[in-house]
Structures are given as C-alpha cells and as structure tokens.
C-alpha cells in the first residue's frame, strides 16, 4: 500500500447510529449556543462580503472557512478497562464503532471527527503508522519502561521485556512479511470504512493468532500510531473531535507518551474512571496528567456505575473519595460526572429490556434517587439516557468549549472582521475626497511599501527578541530548579543510607520538582503573554498611524485591532514517569552494583540527571520553540494581512473618480455609511478575552 494512497474500491460506508437525534441532542445547550454564535458571525461576514470588492471577498471566504471547519477537540484518557472506548462510541452515537477489547500492545490514538465538513474526494479514514525510530525504541530498548529498568539496573526486568518484545516482533513479521519495516512511517487513507478496516488497524484482540483470524483482524494493529475517522453524528449541533487514547497504566509506557502528546493538542480532557476502582495508588500516572492541566479543562467521568450494587448510596461515597484524592497536594477538583456507558449503549441499540438483571435492578434503584419528579415527563429511553450520564457529560464538555476555545475563536474572528470593515469604510471615504480638489494619497507608492515593510520587520524582530529573553530566563530558572532538586534528593539518599542502611528501600517523591517546574512555566506563560500583548498592540498602533500618514482621509472608527494572543500549551512533559515515581525493589538491585556512599552519590546523580533531562529539554527547547512558532506566526499573518489591506486601499486611491464610482457607488454613500455603522455594532466585542483557562476574567490555576 502506497503512502497517502486513497483506496475506495470495495469499501463499505460507515453505519449510521440507530437512535433518534432527539436523544443524542440532550445536554447540548452550550454547544448549540456556540454554534448559533458562529452562524451569526458568519452571516455578518456575508454582509461584509456583499459590500466589499473581490479582494475583500477572498479574505472573508478564508475567515468563513475557518469558522466552518472549527473543530474543538476533546481528549479521553483513563485507566485500562475503564470502559473508555465504549463511552466514546456512545458519545458518537455508534455503539459498535471502535473495538473495546484491544490487546495491551495496541497504542492507537483514535480521533473521531464528528460533523466536520469534507469534500467528496477527501478520505473518510486515515491511519498513521509508527516511524522507524519509535518502533526501534520499543523493539531494541523495551520502550520507556525498558529505559527505566536499564538505568535502575533491573536486569531481570529488562530481559523479561526483551523476550516479550521479541515475540511481538516475530508475530508482526509473520503477518506483514519481511518488508514490514518499509511500511513504518506511512499513512494509509480510505474513502470509507467498515468494521473490518477499523479492526485491521486498531484491534489486535487478546492472544492474537494469525491462523485463527483469516479476516485480517489486527494486521497492522501493533505498528499503528493513530487513526482518524470522519463521520456524521446526528444530535450534535456543531463539529467536534473526540480523541480516544490508550489507557495510561500499561506495562510498557508506550501509551503514556502517546497520550501526553495527544493532550497537548486538546483544550478539553475527560478522565474516565471505573466506579470499582476510582483512583488508587496505581493511577499516579493518571493523577500526574490531571495535575498538569487546568482544572477547568478537565471533566472526570466515573463509568460503570451499572456494576454497583447500590449506586444511590455508593456514588456519594465514591465522589467524596475522589475529592479527597484529587485535593491532596493542593489540586483544584474538576467537575465529576457519574454514569454508565453500558446503559447508554442499551439505549442506542434499543436493548434496554435485554440488560443484565443486576444492572437493570441498579438502574431502577438509582432512577428513584437521581431523577425525582422530572422522570414523569420522560420516556424510558430518555430516563436511561439521563442516568447514563451522557447529557451531563456533554453539558460539562460544552461549557468548557464555549467558554474557552470557542469564545477565543469568536473574539479573534470578530477582531479580524472589524479590521476588514474599517478598511472598507476608509476606502469608501476616498470616494468623497476623490471628488474634491486634493490628492487622496499623501505618500508615493514606493515610500508606502517601504514603510509597511519596515513595520513588518521591526515588529517581528521585537517579538523575537522579547521571546528570546523570556525563554532564556525560563531555561535558567528550570536548570536551577533541576540542580537543587538533585542535590536535595542526593542528600536524602545519603541520610537514608547512613541511618537505615542499604537493605531498606528508599523512596523520594519527585513531586517537588514537578511543582517548581510548573511554577517556572507559569512565569514563562505570563512573560510570553506580556510580550505578545505589547508587540501585538504596538503593531496595531503602528498600522493605524500608517493609515493616517498614507491617506488624506478621515474615516470614523478606523482602528486596526491587534490580533488575539495565542494560548500557551500546558507543560504536559511534567506528567512523564521517571525512576523516582516507581515504588519497586529495583533500587536494591541498583545499589547492589555500587560500593561506598560516594559511588552511590555519583551513580544516583547520573541516574536522576538522565531521567529528568528529557523533561527539561522538552520544556526549554521543544515546547518553547512551539510557543515561538505560534506567536510569531500569528503576528506575521496579521502584519501581512493588514499590509495587503493598505496596499489595496493605496491602489484604489490611484484610480479615477469614474472607476471609484463604479466600485462604491457615490450616489449611495449615505446608505453605505449606515451599513458600516450597523456592521461595527454587530462586531463590537463586549466580552473580555478569556484567560489561559478559557474563562473570561478567571484566575489561572493548575488543576
């Protein structure tokens, strides 16, 4: 199969969900309101397009396309076997869409793109395979857990991993042949999909045996990194991406790294827990992920309450336990929703009457307590759907999207549209002046171009220099934090050895390191936002002043609005597991290879430096360059866009009064002025820009 090949032969269209849209639409008020706001803004843009020329129409169509394809992402994370994939299927209204019995080797991030506009020749399914480096890290080193084991001196664990990986490698070769390495790094696209195709890429099943599965199930499962599926979801009022990630408490920690990458691209996260285990000491990786996100970005969904004997009594107990666990260490508790993907599936498949007896009894008992009088106006499917937690989950997700990335998108689009209207109004004002005696343009065209180029270059240089300084200070602070942490940990180790000896296991939590690094990152975020706000605002002022210097025209409300400051990604690298997180007997093996406290100290420093340096590098190099690229890109786009607008106005000032008459209609000037006034009123921004958490005026806090 060729890279980026689009295969349409023999493909079967994805099945439509067998459920009324009225059931799936429950809890969608926030998303519905956001969709209405976007539609209203789009109508305003159409009005602007109607009174602008061809050049303005092209700019407006780009902005309208961005609104049409706006697709907020919700990333689902959780424990293995928490029913997360079943929940994802229910949220999409297709209960049998994704397989939920995947083998622990499978590490596929699956993104469901719901109601996203697609061209007829665009793929409906796309699968990306691991590249050679990622595969080699797993096969040769045993993945992340292999690195930890090797550094800790756990020879037996490393050898066990190598044997397991060798078996997986052998099975992969049996299925794919000797040329399977050539497939690594490829992308396979399809015009439609069915169960067989999905299972071929994301479902290996337990104890996979190629002789027993002639249908090709799991053919590419162990080398597939991510899957993208585009489908319709009746009941959802707008496009939405639901991203299903592998569980995070797996043996090889491949999932942890993949999930961390997925979370960086998402502004909303749903943490799926099982009602039987909620959060335990084995879920520290999950807790670390939550703690490095804003609490207002997170929703906790406690699944499988259908398996509780008495949900009415047990749900409050589980909630209290979760609040206590999440509050420990100063974390702000996110919204917690209880429900059952099993109950939701029963509604979608019209199998309420066929539910397991114990689950049906739990449902009846819970309904009396949870629904109360409102149950009188509901049908049985509506009652079960409500008790499944789906409406409450969608409501929590919708509020976060509407108040966060949705609001930011609306405000940014309104600012750009307001700039377009201001430019149109100024261009229109040239008509009146052109009919007078004086020249419209006060500066020669060459001088105009030079001035705009100077503004462009000066603003970019200024922002780049400010970001350099912010990143330099951040790197220095992180390095200082890192060195001090290693020194304190080393002191603790020596004290332990002096007082308790080598036979007792020593534990030292790295939470202090993460907390200090997170604090350093918050300072970086503020400095980056300050730099962007200062330069963006100055750029708007410079361009507004440039208009006055170029044209002998006074247009009311002509003010170039500065672009919206981009959000800074969360420091998800801090959630990475390091050796000090592992409470095992590995340290005993590690100690056994060293003689004397000095050897302990030197070896420990090397171990911790090797474990934590990748986190430092991710934050101070890779993540800062990401921040720079987004901040500089937004400024560059703004400057070039405004430069085009001013150049267009300059060109219009050179044409004859007769040509201007045809462009703007001198006889309709008063009517056009009224239209401009109305458009400015409709585009007026009353809400302040949301903070990093996505809520206007809210204080930034780590979850």
Image (cartoon, rainbow, N blue to C red):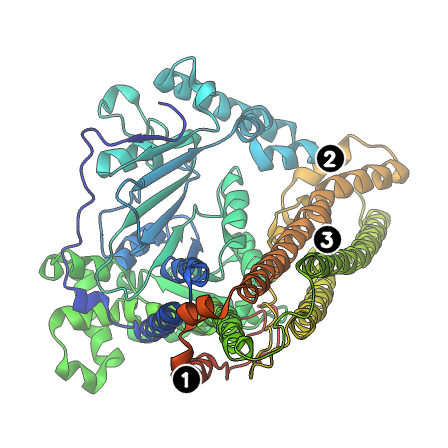
Pick whichever, 632 or 297, lies toward us.
Answer: 632
Could you tell which of marks 3 and 2 lies nearer the N-terminus?
3
Q: CA distance from mark 2 to mark 1?
A: 73 Å
Q: CA distance from mark 3 to mark 2?
A: 15 Å
**Residue 6, position in %: x, y?**
31, 32
Q: Secondary structure at mark 3?
A: loop
Q: Which residue is mark 2?
A: 590
Q: Give the vertical position of 488 relative to 554 (above or below).
A: above
> Is any atom of residue 385 visible in this view?
yes
Q: Which mark is residue 678?
A: 1
- Circle 1 residues within 10 Å: few <14, some 14–19, many ≥20: few
Q: CA distance from mark 3 to mark 1?
A: 64 Å
Marks 2 & 1, CB-CB < 8 Å contact: no
Could you tell which of marks 3 and 1 lies nearer the N-terminus?
3
> Is any atom of residue 72 visible in this view?
no
**Residue 248, position in %: x, y?**
49, 48
Could you tell which of marks 2 and 1 lies nearer the N-terminus?
2
Q: Residue at x 73, y 55 (%)?
A: 457
Q: Secondary structure at mark 1?
A: helix
**Residue 252, position in %: x, y?**
52, 37
Q: Residue furthest front?
A: 437
């Amino acid at each position: 199969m060729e890279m980026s090949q689009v295969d349409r032969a023999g493909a079967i269209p994805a099945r439509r969900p067998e459920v009324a849209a009225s059931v799936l639409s429950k809890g969608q008020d926030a998303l519905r309101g956001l969709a209405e706001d976007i539609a209203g803004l789009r109508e305003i843009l159409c009005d602007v397009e109607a009174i602008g020329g061809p050049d303005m129409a092209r700019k407006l169509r780009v902005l309208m396309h961005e609104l049409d394809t706006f697709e907020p992402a919700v990333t689902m994370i959780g424990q293995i076997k928490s029913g997360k994939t079943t929940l994802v299927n229910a949220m999409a209204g297709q209960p049998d869409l994704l397989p939920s019995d995947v083998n622990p080797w499978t590490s596929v991030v699956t993104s469901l793109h719901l109601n996203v506009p697609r061209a007829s020749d665009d793929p409906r399914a796309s699968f990306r395979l691991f590249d050679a480096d990622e595969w080699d890290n797993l096969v040769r080193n045993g993945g992340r857990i292999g690195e930890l084991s090797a550094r800790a001196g756990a020879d037996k664990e490393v050898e066990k991993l190598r044997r397991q990986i060798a078996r997986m490698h052998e099975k992969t070769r049996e299925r794919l042949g000797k040329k399977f390495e050539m497939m690594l790094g490829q992308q396979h696209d399809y015009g439609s999909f069915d169960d067989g195709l999905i299972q071929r890429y994301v479902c290996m099943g337990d104890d996979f045996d190629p002789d027993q599965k002639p249908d090709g199930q799991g053919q590419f499962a162990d080398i597939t990194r991510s899957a993208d599926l585009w489908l319709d979801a009746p009941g959802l009022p707008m496009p939405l991406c639901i991203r299903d990630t592998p569980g995070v408490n797996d043996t090889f920690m491949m999932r942890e790294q993949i999930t961390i990458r997925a979370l960086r691209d998402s502004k909303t996260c749903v943490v799926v827990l099982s009602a039987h285990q909620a959060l335990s000491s084995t879920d520290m990786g999950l807790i670390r992920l939550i703690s490095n996100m804003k609490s207002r970005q997170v929703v906790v969904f406690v699944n499988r309450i259908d398996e509780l004997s008495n949900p009415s009594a047990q749900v409050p107990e589980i909630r209290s336990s979760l609040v206590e666990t999440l509050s420990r260490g100063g974390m702000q508790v996110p919204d917690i929703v209880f429900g059952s993907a099993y109950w939701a599936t029963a509604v979608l498949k019209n199998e309420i009457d066929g539910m397991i007896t114990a689950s049906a009894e739990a449902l009846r008992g819970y309904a009396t307590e949870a629904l109360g009088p409102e149950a009188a106006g509901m049908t049985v499917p509506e009652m079960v759907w409500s008790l499944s937690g789906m409406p409450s989950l969608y409501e929590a997700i919708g509020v976060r999207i509407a108040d966060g990335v949705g609001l930011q998108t609306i405000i940014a689009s309104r600012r750009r549209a307001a700039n377009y209207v201001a430019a149109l109004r100024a261009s229109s004002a040239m008509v009146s002046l052109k009919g007078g005696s004086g020249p419209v343009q006060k500066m020669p065209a060459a001088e105009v171009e030079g001035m705009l180029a100077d503004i462009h270059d000066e603003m970019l240089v200024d922002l780049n220099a400010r970001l350099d300084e912010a990143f330099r200070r951040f790197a220095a602070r992180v390095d200082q934090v890192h060195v001090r942490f290693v020194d304190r940990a080393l002191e603790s180790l020596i004290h332990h050895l002096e007082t308790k000896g080598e036979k007792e296991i020593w534990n030292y939590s790295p939470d202090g390191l993460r907390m200090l690094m997170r604090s350093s990152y918050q300072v970086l975020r503020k400095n980056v936002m300050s730099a962007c706000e200062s330069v963006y605002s100055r750029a708007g002022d410079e361009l507004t002043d440039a208009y006055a210097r170029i044209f002998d025209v006074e247009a009311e409300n002509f003010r170039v609005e500065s672009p919206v400051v981009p959000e800074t990604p969360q420091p998800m690298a801090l959630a990475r597991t390091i050796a000090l997180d592992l409470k095992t007997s590995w340290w005993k093996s590690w100690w056994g290879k060293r003689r004397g406290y000095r050897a302990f100290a030197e070896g420990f420093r090397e171990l911790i430096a090797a474990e934590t340096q990748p986190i430092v590098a991710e934050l101070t190099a890779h993540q800062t360059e990401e921040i720079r690229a987004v901040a500089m890109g937004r400024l560059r786009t703004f400057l070039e866009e405004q430069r085009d607008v001013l150049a267009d106005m300059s060109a219009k000032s050179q044409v004859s009064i007769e040509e201007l008459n045809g462009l703007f209609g001198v006889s309709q000037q008063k009517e056009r002025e009224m239209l401009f006034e109305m458009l400015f009123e409709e585009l007026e921004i009353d809400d302040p820009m949301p903070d990093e958490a996505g809520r206007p005026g809210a204080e930034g806090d780590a979850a």
